[in-house]
Image: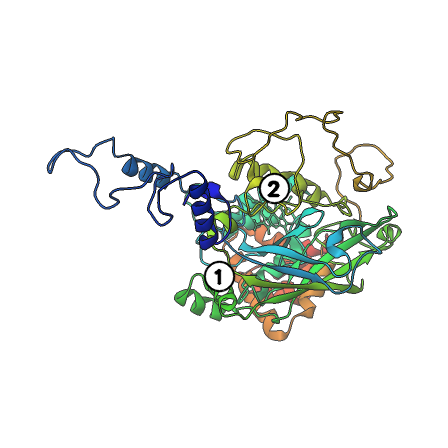
């Protein structure tokens, strides 16, 4: 069935086809096999040939179209987060945030449809889900104000704090371009220049880097966002999803066992639980800061390498995932999750990493999916779209107006005063400089000390094992970061990675937190 007949279930689409066919006096039965132009196929088993022994004929348009469509089945995979799985559900507000934001998604009593895509970061589509990686936790909210995407991870912090470093970081994480082989030493060569990564590297090499399932994993918005209320007041918030299934990770021995049995253990788990009606749930929490409180911390609260310790969490509502996609390509692959998909009342903070993301996702999606990606059913908002943006490849729209500009007296389109961005006071000059209040190691030490003895041992073995093959200078610099975070941590990893502890201590002494 041609997808231009729209979304819906197969019976719905059949009914639509029969209706359309009836109105236009078509005679093809809805169950008849057709080509993309709707014409019936006479033989889908045997190509048309010139007699019993002659060559295949170019005029067999079914054969040619089938091969042409097959040849073009892939679109570019995501440059990161290629391996993913998605599910539909709803988000229900239990404690509204009307005091903080005008966004309807957080108004009292709101129930908003959502689509979530979970993912791994570094490795390609179909790579084993047991590989150590942060996990993506991206949620598209189809809100009454338009679509809002909260594109987060399972870890509450990120490796870097400035978007200009992201392409280099990903290149270092990906396989060696000469051999296509993973190589830890390339990663540590890079990260030995990035002390702010210490906390998130500690997450990565802990068992949180190998979750047992997507259901048993928390999610985090990572960045600070701004919430803006009807009075124009601004608050900074961090979002956190907490799994009601509890948290479960695989330790290094379990990883080997699971990988030997199932390289899709996380997708299998999610799909099967939803199929049997055991719907996973997460509660959404926010941490809230007044703008004047940002200066009160001994680190920069808008730095994505930091959590906000001690800031209370306020519960907002609950998400339940209750429906698997009907078609993985059309939904999970074509979904365009983007930090630029914001709605009035939710704005980016000045976080330098988030500022880059606001551009990067929408840009890559125009390349990966196309200029009209947001018109696809999985990406289209549930509210009317009324824009002068037009044309482009694969445009499935049905525009009939000639007024493709604004303002116009012929067809006025209102600019909503309440949708204006909030205002931020500025001072100083343009610059290219590090943030102040870096505090690169303290939260890494706090995280290490929060682990049980077994979790510490697993972390030390995993980190030390990966670091062992790194060049001597990079290895010792990384070890000094870990020692600075916590001497026990640095000493343990140095033992496994066969580092020189005296050299590690000397390097650590030169570091300031
Ligand atoms: C400047 C920093 C970053 C840049 C430039 C960046 C860039 C990208 C790009 C280009 C994609 C592919 C999008 C697509 O093809 O649809 C992507 C996917 C993703 N990124 Fe980032 N990223 C950054 C940091 C982060 C951070 C900090 C997080 C978590 C808070 C994150 C979470 C994700 C997730 C979850 C996806 C997959 C979305 C999906 O499932 O479709 N990224 N990123």
Quarter the N terminus occupies: top left
At 62% across and 71% down in the image, what residue appears? Answer: 246
Residue under label 2? 361
At 76% across and 50% down in the image, what residue appears? Answer: 103
Q: Residues within 10 Å of mark 1 (few under 14, many from 20)?
A: some
Q: Are marks 1 and 2 in contact (CB under 8 Å)?
A: no
Considering only vertical position in the picture, is 398 above or below 285?
Answer: above
Q: Tell me, yes or no, if residue 446 can be seen here.
A: yes
Q: Is mark 1 within 8 Å of ligand 1?
A: no
Q: Is residue 319 left or right of residue 430?
A: left
Give coordinates of residue 496: x percent, y percent: 54, 64
* Quarter location, residue 491: bottom right
Give coordinates of residue 101: x percent, y percent: 80, 52
Give coordinates of residue 169: x percent, y percent: 58, 45
Q: Is residue 218 left or right of residue 211?
A: right
At 64% across and 74% down in the image, what residue appears? Answer: 452
Residue under label 1? 267
- Callout 1: helix, strand or loop? helix
At 60% across and 37% down in the image, what residue appears? Answer: 363
Q: Which residue is most to the bottom? A: 453
């Amino acid at each position: 069935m041609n997808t231009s007949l729209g979304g819906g279930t197969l019976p719905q689409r059949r009914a639509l086809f029969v209706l359309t066919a009836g109105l236009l006096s078509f005679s093809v039965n809805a169950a008849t096999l057709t080509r993309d132009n709707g014409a019936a196929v006479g033989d889908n088993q045997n190509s048309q040939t010139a007699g019993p022994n002659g060559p295949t004929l170019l005029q067999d348009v079914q054969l040619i179209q089938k091969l042409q469509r097959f040849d073009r089945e892939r679109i570019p995979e995501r440059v990161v987060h290629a391996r993913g799985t998605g599910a539909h559900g709803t988000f229900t507000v239990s404690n509204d945030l009307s005091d903080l934001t005008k966004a309807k998604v957080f108004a009292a009593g709101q129930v908003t449809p959502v689509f979530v895509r979970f993912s791994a970061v570094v490795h390609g589509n179909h790579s084993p889900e047991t590989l150590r990686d942060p996990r993506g936790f991206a949620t598209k909210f189809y809100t009454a104000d338009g679509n809002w995407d909260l594109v987060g991870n399972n870890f509450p912090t990120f490796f870097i704090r400035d978007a200009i470093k992201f392409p280099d970081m990903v290149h270092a994480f990906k396989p060696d371009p000469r051999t296509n082989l993973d190589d830890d030493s390339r990663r540590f060569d890079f990260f030995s220049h990035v002390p702010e990564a210490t906390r998130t590297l500690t997450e990565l090499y802990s068992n949180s880097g190998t979750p047992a399932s997507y259901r048993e994993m928390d999610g985090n918005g990572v960045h600070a966002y701004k919430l803006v209320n009807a009075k124009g007041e601004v608050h900074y918030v961090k979002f956190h999803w907490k799994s009601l299934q509890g948290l479960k990770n695989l330790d290094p021995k379990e990883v080997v066992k699971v990988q030997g049995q199932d390289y899709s253990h996380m997708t299998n788990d999610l799909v099967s639980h939803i199929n049997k009606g055991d719907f996973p749930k997460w509660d959404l929490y926010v941490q809230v800061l007044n703008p004047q409180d940002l200066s009160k911390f001994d680190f920069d609260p808008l730095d994505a390498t930091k959590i906000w310790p001690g800031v209370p969490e306020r519960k907002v509502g609950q998400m339940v995932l209750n429906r698997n996609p009907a078609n993985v390509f059309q939904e999970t692959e074509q979904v365009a999750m983007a930090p630029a998909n914001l709605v009035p009342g939710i704005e980016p903070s000045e976080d330098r990493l988030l500022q880059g993301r606001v551009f990067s996702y929408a840009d890559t999606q125009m390349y990966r999916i196309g200029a009209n990606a947001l018109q696809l059913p999985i990406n289209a908002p549930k509210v009317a779209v009324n824009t002068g943006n037009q044309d482009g490849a694969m445009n499935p729209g049905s525009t009939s107006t000639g007024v493709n500009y604004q303002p116009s007296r012929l067809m006025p389109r209102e600019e909503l005063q309440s949708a204006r961005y909030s205002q931020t006071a500025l001072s100083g000059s343009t610059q290219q400089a590090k943030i102040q209040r870096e505090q690169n190691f303290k939260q890494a030490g706090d995280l290490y000390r929060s682990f049980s003895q077994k979790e510490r041992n697993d972390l030390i073995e995993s980190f030390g094992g990966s670091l062992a093959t790194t060049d001597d200078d990079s290895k010792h610099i990384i070890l000094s970061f870990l020692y600075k975070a916590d001497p026990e941590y640095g000493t343990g990893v140095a033992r496994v990675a066969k580092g020189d502890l005296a050299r590690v201590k000397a390097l650590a002494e030169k570091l300031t937190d």
